[in-house]
Amino acid sequence: MIMGFNINQIRSDFPILQQQVYNKPLIYLDNGATTQKPRVVIDTIRELQEVHNSSIHRGIHYLSEQMTGRYEAARETVRAFLNAASTQEIIFTSGATGSINTVAFSFGEKYVNSGDEILISEMEHHSNIVPWQMLCRRKGAQLKVIPFNDKGELELEKLDELLSERTRIVALTHASNSLGTINPVKEVIKRAHARDIPVLLDGAQMVQHGEVDVRELDCDFYVFSSHKIFGPTGSGVLYGKEAMLEELPPYQGGGDMVDQVTFDETSYNTLPFKFEAGTSNYTGAIGLAAALEYLQSIGFEAIGRYERELSDYTLEKLERIGGLKIYGNAAERISVFSFLLDNIHTYDAAMILDKMGIAVRTGTHCTQPVMDHFGIDGTIRASLVFYNTMEEVDALVQGIQKTIEMLS
Amino acid sequence: MIMGFNINQIRSDFPILQQQVYNKPLIYLDNGATTQKPRVVIDTIRELQEVHNSSIHRGIHYLSEQMTGRYEAARETVRAFLNAASTQEIIFTSGATGSINTVAFSFGEKYVNSGDEILISEMEHHSNIVPWQMLCRRKGAQLKVIPFNDKGELELEKLDELLSERTRIVALTHASNSLGTINPVKEVIKRAHARDIPVLLDGAQMVQHGEVDVRELDCDFYVFSSHKIFGPTGSGVLYGKEAMLEELPPYQGGGDMVDQVTFDETSYNTLPFKFEAGTSNYTGAIGLAAALEYLQSIGFEAIGRYERELSDYTLEKLERIGGLKIYGNAAERISVFSFLLDNIHTYDAAMILDKMGIAVRTGTHCTQPVMDHFGIDGTIRASLVFYNTMEEVDALVQGIQKTIEMLS
Amino acid sequence: MTEYNVTQQDIVDEFSVFEDWLDRYNYLIELGNDLPAIDPEFRTSEYLINGCQSKVWLHADLVDGRLQFNADSDAIIVKGIVALLVKLMHDRTPAEILENELFFIDGIGLRQNLSPTRSNGLLAMVKKMRLYAMAYQAKENQNKEA
Amino acid sequence: MTEYNVTQQDIVDEFSVFEDWLDRYNYLIELGNDLPAIDPEFRTSEYLINGCQSKVWLHADLVDGRLQFNADSDAIIVKGIVALLVKLMHDRTPAEILENELFFIDGIGLRQNLSPTRSNGLLAMVKKMRLYAMAYQAKENQNKEA
Ligand SMILES: Cc1ncc(COP(=O)(O)O)c(C=O)c1O
Ligand SMILES: Cc1ncc(COP(=O)(O)O)c(C=O)c1O
């Protein structure tokens, strides 16, 4: 029992967790793909649409005023969550993918030229690979890759030789969505900064598992998705240091991101609006803030402690299953577990687990290079968050044993 | 009375319209900025989050399967709404701005080079100006502009000389958000196509007012936003002819839009997924489909007839107010009215109307060139949709008269 | 009812005895294990239907006016469904395949497995089986005319 | 209560007689009409605080240790609020302006008009008035030290 952490209470906050599938209680272990929403988030979105809905910024009427206030308050909530220096540094986007594409384009336009290098890692999600590849192709730059070892840990000893005179930016995942590894990002940032190279961290799999302090990390950019941290879909965050964001050209053009527009010349709005083109997803942003406040009400510390217990328990149980091999055994990890069963196709396993009400994911998890590293096609992935329980882990283990039985 | 069109019934479908502001009934005439949501949309979003929420595509488990099915059904609903030839032509984006930026980038990368020309009009929304300006700057191309006359009608007689050998694309608003003009888009498309120049239509202000048939129009691209057609925020649509979309490179990189990823080489997914990078806003897309189905249940024909009556009534009433000047008097129009009051600052007028519960918008409406055309700073805009009433128009007229009284 | 549809109905009836999903899967696994592996010469990229999450291989010939299917999958439950499809369509005339609706998949509650989002290759395989039937039928008609 | 705050309280009391919003606005319009237009030399881009939806011009001098404000707006209701701010802060020492909280705007229900999203220039104007006070105070302190 974790002090002040009442798992039954917490589960009752999530309507979907009360659900049955195929007449079995839903055991939702696909949180790496997307997380479920607490009632307060669902209610906030409903209330916004029933009582407050209005386009934000520049509206003088009551509704617009109210909604603008709540949108900007949401920005402050996100700022406090990340401990950013100012709300100017918090940009609302369509998601982590949108955030990374924004940086890849804007930073790329300004700072990346032919012959330059972009450094990523071997364990990146496609969303943190492809935008950089597209940039490299456009600019004639080169993609370099920090490899990981068979435990799924970055080979830090290779970092210094990979950081070169031509490296313009390092883009690294804070936590891996397929290996579960938490990367030593502070060390990477320190070494990159020693050479004046900025660092983008992909926090899509980190923020829902532990507190993040962008000033303590000293990262230059940080991105995450609302839907993976118990908030609504279609919303995300790009944090950037103010001085850096000031220098970058805008990404998308449209309403709200401009100051003056003529056909000859357009001047852009100040931060953060310069990067928020068009009618922003204000419902999404305010819903995200509701999710962050919900987490705060439980307490990140309590959540962290509970998840560590849950994670240790899961690892121990999985390791004891004969014929099960875990991919990703880093010392520092989130509660995300990729594994394979001897001679069993992942698709077969997932089909059987599904019919027991257990939702896991199979495939490459958008990290094909991780699969290539191990020479495999994909894995089965169980990803847990703080509303999952030891009993659900037991059910997963039983499910896996039954699967092995059926398929051997 | 329009057959089968019960305005009281319709108003009761929109919870927010029952609202009071400053103890006065809300009279919401800011529909050009964003529209309100019927209960069925609000309920659909709530239900998706309470019962079905799951990431789509590639998930084998029950929830993912269900949600994927609904997402792809939403695509079919949009296809039918636009009468597109195939669901491959329907791309879900973050909004009209996101859609236009997608085309400006992808089409621009493929077809626009130094010295080429992009043709837009003088009445475009900033979202259909700035992305093309940014493209022109990047590629050394030139932005050309079809002017409009003082009634707010495109000067079509100038079109043929503006379409040149170097014109690569025409991007034109279907209906103007500040003038109310419905443009003769079929004629423009015909003349552009005669020279093999593709045409993008910005339907952000059209789709909520009348039926659109992309095949009849024969446009090459069509874009609109969900939040302006009674759907949720953070979602929008890009229609593109399949053969055209096939040719274009992707815009954003990320999960779901790829086929195979290695660090050396990435191959892209098929349409429409090639243009849907990252976890898509599936809640938004399904909510949009719910809004379209709601409209279908009322009937576009009935809506159109009612809006024409409402529009004629409004115009007649406004024209009778002494000292009120309307900007935008095109023969073909949507129910959007921009006006100024003699010697009265728009901000003062909006402040007073607001306190009477009347929500209008003031400013440039993100169409600064339209304001420059008339040499004004901005207008007051009342924009109506099918849930507005003649009584609300009367209240607006009274409010304007009171405003004139107070400020003269 | 056509003989083809009788076969489909038989499959549905066979499955109706299983109340539990896992029993149905057990039966599919059995069927999958019983289906001989595809000839190595056809287990190649040329005959591969890539389903992203599982692979299916399919080869078809026309012998004496009847389609001879040879199919396989790397996932055993998928292979079980493949076995059912082969059981139904193997050694049939193109006309039989084209004139009868495929209903047994729905009837045994496996429709999900034919959804385009399952990315298991089955939907593409069913389409391909019909395509083979169409192609061979067209060829036969041509021959007749010639 | 400081004399500065007494003035603020007076403004709040004055407004409390109006029950209706439109009456309050009528009063603001009167105040706006009564405030003399800013000297043409200050109605220039140099003294402009661009609020996007309405414009505000502001100029300040220090005469005998007291701030002399000269301000205007193109929107009359905004100008009414400007008149109230000038009424309060004009001919005050920098210390008075800096040491007292500004509460009357809230007290008369006009806080909305000071929100950053109103883009009417008022928030920027209030900030600028305080900045002037700070700058002149710093200058005075320097002069004393020198
Ligand atoms: C004509 C027109 N085009 C484009 C847009 C941009 O739409 P959004 O802000 O939803 O992206 C708007 C609305 O603001 C519009 O009125
Ligand atoms: C590590 C990581 N980065 C980026 C993403 C992309 O997030 P989204 O799809 O929400 O844009 C994901 C999730 O899919 C992820 O796990």
Image (tube, coloured by chain):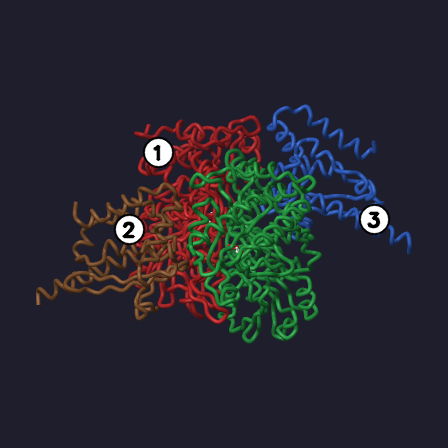
Chain colours: A red, B green, C blue, D brown
State which mark lies toward you, 1 or 3.
Answer: 1
Q: What amino acid is found at the position of numbered circle 1 in the picture?
A: Tyr
**Callout 2 secondary element:** helix
Q: What amino acid is found at the position of numbered circle 2 in the picture?
A: Glu
* Marks 3, 2 in one chain: no
Asked which quadrant contains residue C90, the reply is top right
Asked if the beta carbon under badge 3 is closer than 8 A to the nearest atom of ligand 2, the reply is no
| Disc 1 to disc 3: CB gap under 8 Å | no
Q: CA distance from mark 1 to mark 2?
A: 24 Å
| Chain for disc number 3 | C
Q: What amino acid is found at the position of numbered circle 3 in the picture?
A: Gln
**Callout 3 secondary element:** helix
Please tell me which of labels 1 and 2 falls first in the chain. Answer: 2
Q: How many marks?
A: 3
Q: Which residue is mark 1?
A: A306
- Disc 2 crowd rating (10 Å Cα; few below 14, some 14-19, many 20+) is few
**Viewer-proximal residue among C108 and B66:** B66
